[in-house]
Image (cartoon, rainbow, N blue to C red):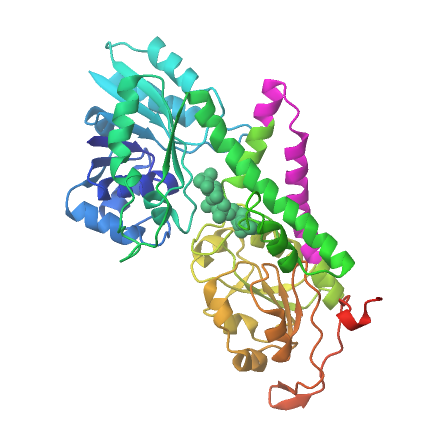
Amino acid sequence: MEISVIGAGYVGLTTAACLAEIGHHVLCADCDLERIDSLKAGRLPFFEPHLDDLVKRNVASSRLEFTTPAVAIDNSEAIFICVGTPPLENGEADLSSIESVARLIVSSAHGYRLVIEKSTVPVQTAKRLWKHLSIYNAHGLEFDVVSNPEFLREGSAVEDFFHPDRVVVGAESPRAIALMKEIYAPVLRTRSTCPVHSQCPPVPEPKLILTDTNSAELVKHASNSFLAMKISFINLIADACEAAGADIEKVADGIGSDKRIGRSFLNPGIGFGGFCFPKDLQAFVRIGEKLGCDFSLLREVEKINVRRTEQFVAKIKKELWVLRGKTLAVWGLAFKPNTDDVRFAPALNIIRRLQSEGAKIRAYDPEAMHKAKLDLPEVAYCESAYQAAEGADAILILTEWGEFREINWKHLGERVSHRLIIDGRNLLSAEEASLNGFQYVGVGRAAQPLRPTVEVKRAGTTAAPLPPTGHQVPTPMQVAP
Ligand code: UGA
């Protein structure tokens, strides 16, 4: 099918490349012509695993082309709108880019167009879009408007496209439904291979959920809000674990083993970030207000999340007391692993707070440093996790990159000036850290004292084990019968 994708950001570019990979001819467009030029030259504006290869392969086979919005709209039957809907000052989504695309469609297209809204938008936007297209329809354009929310996660977006749990289509005409089924047919059939795996793991067949446009739009905001709520909930429980001397990992396993709840998104930490959850949550609260619904539950979710930065800083101060003049190694800047995205990244907020107290930051992230530098120039950016740890009073793990798990404890111990790890993502094994002579503080976990038998080697000297800190979970023997 001839498809255009308007907007070459995280959602648009991934969608365009994946649609081309499943056999469609795709024109990917953006009003940022510099972006289009660099895409034509083979440079992607962000890092997303597998996307580079996918774009190159489909450009080479001419199934994927980059152009201007007007050309794309003119030459396609289906138009995916993937433009940004950033937050306005009051938290509402700014829909002006959607409106601009709508204007362009009615001013330049002829015949029939299937207009597919993929950007995250408030409920009833498809209806408004339909009305807008009808009002400004100067050339007798025939069209349908469909809501097709996206559920791709940064860092695994390509894989998510090929193995979705569900494809949600809000459409109100048989023609639109038939076209949407045709577009997604290769994904809806369980495929044995995708560009990510040579042999895909067995996955259940994706569900096609056909509904009206309002319901489809609500699915998107409600899904993101629910996931955000799960994270804030587990963060509260992590606080309770710390206060009561319980282990959040065990508690999350216990809760998550209930099929009705599920284990995913029950990982506590420094709070959720990224360009989706924080802004979608705020936008949904505003939507609730406009609909006359009390969404104070979601306001609490947001408040709990905002508190995470301060709580983490307090945890650091509890261990290091005064921060002025202390050197802190920050491992991880991106809002999550496998992306270079630092938008609303909790790591950046934490660094700002630490700097405001006079701490010196040495940071390392495998992908996100070039973007973080723009926001935080006063940080010493390092080439490796070890280099960042040089002379550090503590190592702070703020993004759970896999490579941090592979740490060589001996090398690390030789670099730091104080063997303390404050793990904001519960990435490392507390026990392993302790066995290797590091004092370990996680989230919702008992602070691990050093094993008294461990000999701690520091820069060629033998130091006495550090005293245990923080509260401790009583061993079963200590618990009263
Ligand atoms: C999220 C949704 O998961 C996608 O389904 C959706 O398509 C996307 O937003 C969007 O609306 O575009 P994404 O923001 O890429 O995807 O990342 P997530 O994996 O959902 O993580 C979001 C944040 O929550 C990250 O900061 C992550 O560290 C945090 N998180 C996630 C936790 O703190 N704990 C968890 O258990 C899971």
Residue 420 drawn above or below residue 69: below
Q: Is residue 93 left or right of residue 323?
A: left
Point out residue 202 in the picture as x, y percentages from the top left corner. 34, 52
Q: Nearer the viewer, residue 42 or 172?
A: 172
Residue found at x 79% / y 73%: 477
Q: Is residue 195 magenta?
A: no
Q: Nearer the viewer, residue 66 or 119?
A: 119
Point out residue 400 in the picture as x, y percentages from the top left corner. 52, 60
Residue 455 drawn above or below residue 145: below
Point out residue 441 in the picture as x, y percentages from the top left corner. 67, 66
Where residue 26 sits, quadrant-wise, is top left
Image quadrant occupied by the N terminus? top left
Q: Count every numbered label the image shows and give the total.
A: 0
Residue found at x 25% / y 13%: 141
Point out residue 54 in the picture as x, y percentages from the top left corner. 26, 50
Q: Is residue 319 left or right of residue 331?
A: right
Q: Nearer the viewer, residue 27 or 244?
A: 244
Main secondary structure found in the magenta portion: helix
Q: Residue furthest front?
A: 481
Q: Nearer the viewer, residue 246 or 145?
A: 246
Magenta span covers which residues? 286-313
Where residue 82 sits, quadrant-wise, is top left
Q: Is residue 89 visible?
A: no
Residue 110 drawn above or below residue 4: above
